[in-house]
Amino acid sequence: MKIKIAWMGKTKEPAIQSLTDEYVKRISRYVQVEGLALRDEPALLQMCGRTAPDKAKKMSAGKSTLVLMDSRGKQFSSEELAHFLRDYQNRNPLPLVFAVGPADGFSETARSAAQHTISLGRMTLAHELARVVLLEQVYRAFTILKGHPYHSGH
């Protein structure tokens, strides 16, 4: 399984970059992972093999599975995210791309191109902070799957 965590724009805060690097390193113990700073949403869609915005139906047959992080998405517990990752790993050979959007959110084009939309919760988070929360939850999910004591169920 390969996971890509993608975000729009350059990282402004050194602390965010440090946390990003730390969690990517931790996740890499369990699965092949890559963190990607992308220029904009069209770059995300192109990377995922979805370059024809007027053909939403054909966009689903890209070269990866796109998961948008969006407040309107499905909310998971940490355990549910772990099960989602396990099921994906068992059933799908394509890379899994988690995308954290720009500050103003994803367009309707991106939402229609995604196979999944997940919410980190009902609270609004700065998009750089949302990236760190996502990375931590992906790491936590793999520790749950491996029975590692990092996740104590609280």
Image: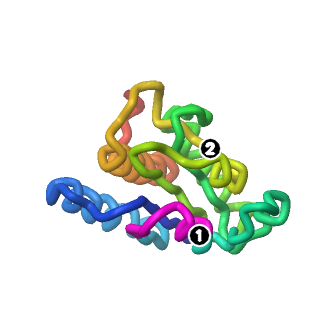
Instruction: Say above or below: 44 vs 70.
Output: below
Circle 1 residues within 10 Å: few <14, some 14–19, many ≥20: some
Indicate the amino acid at tag 2: Thr
Tell me residue 95's x, y (percent): 61, 70
Taking the view exactly as shown, the residue that stands out farthest to the left is 14
> What residue sits right under mark 1 in the picture?
1
Give the quadrant of residue 76.
Answer: top right
User: Can see residue 94?
Assistant: no
User: Can see residue 100?
Assistant: yes
Tell me residue 140's x, y (percent): 41, 47
Tell me residue 118's x, y (percent): 57, 41
Magenta includes 153? no
> What residue sits right under mark 2 in the picture?
117
Tell me residue 44's x, y (percent): 54, 66
Left or right for 24, reference 6: left
The structure's colour scheme is: rainbow
Q: Nearer the viewer, mark 2 or mark 1?
A: 2
Which range is magenta? 35-45
Magenta includes 38? yes
- The mark nearer the N terminus, 2 or 1, is 1
The residue drawn where x is 31% and y is 59% is 23
Left or right for 48, reference 104: right
Quadrant for the C terminus, please.
Answer: top left
